[in-house]
Image (tube, helix red, strand yellow):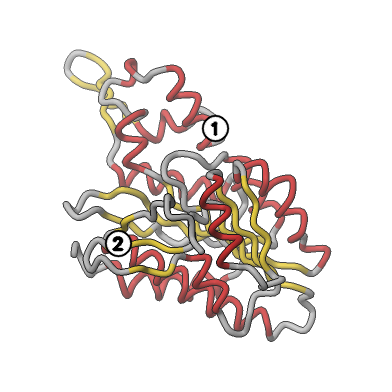
Amino acid sequence: MADKSLRFDEIGYWSEVKLDIIKKYAQAYSTIMAKQKSIEAHVYIDGFAGAGRHISKATGEAVAGSPLNAMKIQPPFTELHFIDLEGSRAAELRRIAAGDRRVRVHKGDCNGILLNEVFPRCRWSDFRRALCLLDPYGLAVDWDVLRTAGEMKSVEIFYNFMIMDANMNVFMHDAGKVAAAQARRMDAVWGDDSWRSAAYTRTEGLFGEIERKATNEDVAEAFRLRLEHVAGFAYVPQAMPMRNSKGAVVYYLYFASQNQTGAKIVEDIFDTYRARGVA
């Protein structure tokens, strides 16, 4: 029985869209991998798994989260890893996955768990492949995780870059007012301090150089190029903007892979939602 004190996240339209996107690609990915006779295992990883389900703001009904969706994919994933920092959520994941020997639940910070425990189980040389979802509540994924996934060549990722968190806490209109602690947090997420040149543009004005805050779209594209040229992913489609009920972009959903076929599938899925507008 679920812990009665456990509170499930209420999610809006675009969060439900995100779940649909992940589910559709996970289905295609597992179908393709299951046919590859040279692949020993294909693994599903959720770095911020939550409690396994949510509540729809629109209907008040339960909505299956990414862990539940992944467990039901056919043909099945060989192995599934669910990670959450919060103890009651990890306990609920263990409860709903009881009896499924493919599932391993990890309690703790996904950055260390991925690098030290999970990614080593997904090495190219071991003929193992992985699809990894990184869906944080804020700027909480270290660049080392993304860089390692790119270098491994065996791990594809969906990643939510929390632009709203960045705008509220890091990308001040006056760059000189960025708090040192927030700057260090962005350094960890971006991998170095080059985010400053992405977040701010400088032009010559009548009285000297003028510094302006860059647009969300400019920052999103800079991060996409970083996934390609620094992390080393061969294919990173244009990020999908995910919005709140007021139409503001909360985060950008990225897909990064070494596989052209996977990237084309994701681009097609993104395109089915990109022009829908705000609901």
Q: Is residue 234 visible?
A: no
Q: Residue at x 54, y 32 (%)?
A: 188
Q: Is residue 41 above or below residue 106?
A: below
123 on left or right of 278: right
Identify the residue at horizontal 68%, vertical 61% (top origin): 104
Horizontal side, residue 68 vs residue 274: left or right: right
Q: Could you classify mark 2 by the number of other residues whose Cα lies within 10 Å: few (under 14), some (14-19), or many (20 or more)?
A: many
**Seen in the image, is 206 located left or right of residue 69?**
left
Locate the C terminus by quadrant.
bottom left
Q: Position of residue 84 (x, y in %)?
A: 56, 49
* Mark 1 closeness class: few <14, some 14–19, many ≥20 residues within 10 Å: some
Name the foreground residue: 182 vs 240.
182
* Residue placed furthest toward the top: 207
Q: Quadrant of the rendered structure where residue 65 is?
A: bottom left
Compute the Cα span from label 1 to label 2. Answer: 27 Å
Q: Quadrant of residue 126?
A: bottom right
Which residue is the site of mark 2? 14
Question: Nearer the observer, disc 1 or disc 2?
Answer: 2
Tell which of 230 and 130 is nearer to you. Answer: 130
| Relative image position of residue 162 (x, y in whole percent) | 39, 44
> For the residue marked with disc 1, what is the amino acid?
Ala
Residue at (19% x, 53% y) in the render: 247
Q: Secondary structure at mark 1?
A: helix
User: What amino acid is at disc 2?
Assistant: Trp
Outermost residue, right side: 126
Q: In the rendered image, which residue does mark 1 sit on? A: 188
